[in-house]
Image (cartoon, grey):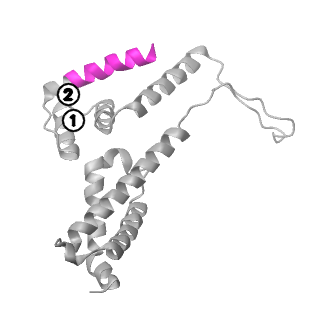
Amino acid sequence: MTRDELVLANRHLAYWTVHRFQEQMGRVIYSVALAEEELIGEALLALVIAANKFDPTKGYAFSTWAVRIMKNALIDVYNTWKEQYQQDFQVQSLTPNTPEEGELDEGSSWVFAQDDAVLAAIEQMETFLRFFLCLCPEDQLLLRLRIQRVSQAQCALTLRQTFGHKRNQSYISDRIKELGSMYRSYAA
């Protein structure tokens, strides 16, 4: 079988691999940032690479080889995205800049929040976001679910479905308390 025939006959594996990858990585968190089309494109490119490097004399099926190559490519895409996301999210000073002369149209105005409470709330949000980015994907998902007021039982079920961990409600309760104390230490 030629390389082109291998790719055409197994292109469904790219879609299947992307679907499984999204389930394992937590669709709730990453679906907005990592477009499914981008992941499918990377998986199809990895499928072509797998077809080029496949050696049938090794004794394993092409599909096994191709899925491993595609999954590794998707992990690389995720890691690249995560590094870029963390770099882009470095929050700079929120001190308002006054506009340069000629920047404003006539009749427009700049409005800045001078209230100390608003600036303090923004600083707390920045601190929380920095803390959130330091967490593992499981803890990030757990915090997102609890912020959305999802029950502990549903959190345990979602973590089990997403990451394959068997978590119960007492684990969720204890972990939320641990994350709270971690955040207080981080914010101090």
Residue at image point 84% right, 40% down: 106
Residues drawn in magenta: 174-188
Q: Which residue is mark 2?
A: 172
Residue located at (46% from left, 49% from top): 81
Amino acid type, mark 2: Ile
Residue 162 lies left or right of residue 110; in this view the side is: left
Residue 161 location, x and y as percent? 18, 46
Foreground: 71 or 106? 71
Q: Earlier in the sequence, mark 2 or mark 1?
A: 1
Question: Which residue is situated farthest in the right direction here?
Answer: 101
Please say if 96 is above or below 21: above
The CA distance from mark 2 to mark 1 is 7 Å
Disc 2, disc 1: CB below 8 Å?
Answer: yes
The N terminus: image quadrant: bottom left
Which quadrant holds the C terminus?
top left
Residue type, mark 1 in image: Cys
Describe the element under mark 2 as helix, strand or loop.
helix
